[in-house]
Image (cartoon, rainbow, N blue to C red):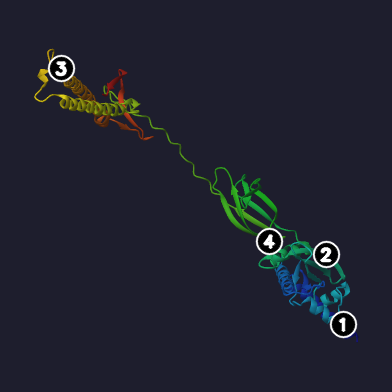
């Protein structure tokens, strides 16, 4: 009898030691997961799926090995183990018995229920961590899960935070930066986190995941690298910055002096804008006046011919002229005046046309490079510089 008991104790001891050895020195834990709780509204497929997704995510967190626990090989479901062990409730004694059967020293379990009274509706998740040997709760938490958080990457994200809270993992990791320079600004995801002191800086509570680490320092090229941080771990990172190449200052060139005896300079132009062409309105006015003069001359010529007796002529107009020639001679005199006025105004018309359209178009004009305005060069000033003195020349353009 004594031998049988001794053998049984040895077996139990070997199992315990073997469990610890398999767990790599960490406490073996059984993740029983979540049970769907019926609050009277029934159990819908979405809630059941959410319970399975979160259970898988919790087991993945335990397998990551970032905390003090390591998962057991058996992945039993909470509801099945409660039925097999006749556990109507989640009493500590009954849950500890399940943990002993699974060769675990800790058990993580809980329940999920859909809450429709909130706006928007959500899930209430209750989680507990039990110490099997002491049959006592180590920690517990009640969390709210949005309905949208139960799909996609949501379960993994929430399970990561909940697991860390239950097992006591510090959220985030530590990064120890060592560089080959004494001073510099350390940036994480383009956010300044501190300055190097003797080439070293320690970053604490860095969120788990991938980050971009950068270092900026005077006279050195920017350093940048991608790092991966895990909760509860310290990540050493060695950075080597390259020194910038020194730029040689350029000496300004000295302008060459002008050859002896040869004047040099640049023409400076004093120009006035052409402005409005006053000859165009003059041309229009003379054209109207010329048309009126021609019309008046033709009218008087017609009246002189219409009132003149047959066989009369201009030579009969004078001091002792026939009274019948008074009216035609008067119209004839006005006709002569009209011809004189038409000739004078015609000459002015031709002259204004030349000034408005021909002379102004043919005049030398310059186009400025900056504004595109047309300018007429009227006065040019050219500075003249020689070894013996200086001066200027003037040129008028007409």
- Mark whose residue sits in front, 2 or 1: 2
Q: Is residue 67 visible?
A: no
Q: Is the C-beta separation of discs 2 and 1 under 8 Å?
A: no
Mark nearer the N terminus (1 vs 4): 1
Mark nearer the N terminus (2 vs 4): 2
Left or right side of 248 for 237: right
Circle number at residue 95: none
Q: Is the C-beta separation of discs 3 and 2 under 8 Å?
A: no
Pointer 3: what residue?
A: 323
State the residue at coordinates (82%, 65%): 140
- Mark whose residue sits in front, 1 or 4: 4
> To which quarter of the image does residue 3 belong?
bottom right
Pointer 4: what residue?
A: 230
- Mark whose residue sits in front, 3 or 4: 3
State the residue at coordinates (16%, 20%): 329
Mark-to-mark CA distance, 3 and 1: 176 Å
Disc 4 secondary structure class = loop
Circle number at residue 139: 2
Quadrant position of the C terminus in the picture: top left
Mark nearer the N terminus (3 vs 1): 1
Pointer 1: what residue?
A: 6
Label 1: how many residues lie within 10 Å, few (<14), some (14-19) or many (20+)? few
Mark-to-mark CA distance, 2 and 4: 22 Å
Mark-to-mark CA distance, 3 and 2: 145 Å
């Amino acid at each position: 009898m004594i031998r049988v008991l001794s053998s049984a104790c040895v077996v139990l001891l070997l199992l315990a030691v073997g469990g610890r050895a398999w767990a790599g020195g960490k406490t073996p834990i059984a993740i029983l997961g979540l049970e769907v709780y019926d609050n009277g509204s029934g159990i819908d497929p979405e809630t059941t799926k959410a319970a399975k997704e979160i259970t898988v995510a919790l087991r993945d967190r335990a397998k990551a090995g970032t905390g003090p626990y390591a998962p057991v090989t058996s992945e039993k479901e909470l509801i099945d183990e409660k039925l097999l062990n006749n556990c109507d409730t989640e009493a500590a004694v009954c849950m500890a018995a399940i943990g002993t059967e699974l060769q675990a020293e800790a058990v993580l379990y809980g329940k999920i229920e859909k809450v429709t009274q909130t706006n928007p509706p959500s899930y209430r998740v209750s989680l507990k961590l039990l110490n099997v040997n002491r049959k006592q709760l180590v920690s517990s938490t009640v969390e709210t899960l949005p309905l949208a958080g139960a799909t996609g990457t949501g379960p993994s994200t929430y399970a990561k935070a909940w697991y860390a809270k239950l097992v006591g993992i510090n959220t985030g990791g530590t990064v120890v930066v060592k560089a080959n320079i004494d001073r510099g600004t350390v940036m994480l995801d383009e956010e300044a986190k501190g300055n190097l002191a003797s080439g070293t800086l320690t970053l604490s509570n860095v969120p788990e995941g991938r980050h971009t680490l950068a270092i900026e320092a005077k006279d050195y090229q920017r350093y940048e690298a991608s790092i991966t941080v895990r909760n509860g771990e310290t990540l050493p990172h060695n950075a080597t910055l390259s020194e910038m190449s020194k730029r040689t200052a350029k000496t300004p060139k000295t302008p060459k002096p002008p050859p002896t005896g040869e004047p040099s300079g640049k023409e400076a132009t004093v120009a006035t804008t052409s402005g409005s062409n006053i000859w165009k309105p003059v041309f229009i006015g003379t054209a109207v006046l010329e048309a009126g003069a021609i019309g008046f001359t033709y009218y008087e010529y017609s009246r002189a011919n219409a009132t003149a007796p047959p066989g009369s002529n201009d030579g009969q107009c004078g001091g002792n002229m026939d009274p019948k020639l008074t009216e035609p001679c008067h119209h004839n005199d006005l006709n002569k005046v009209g011809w004189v006025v038409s000739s004078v105004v015609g000459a002015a018309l031709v002259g204004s046309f030349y000034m408005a359209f021909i002379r102004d178009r043919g005049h030398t004009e310059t186009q400025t490079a900056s504004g595109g305005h047309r300018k007429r060069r009227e006065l040019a000033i050219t500075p003249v510089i020689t070894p013996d003195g200086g001066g200027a020349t003037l040129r008028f353009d007409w």
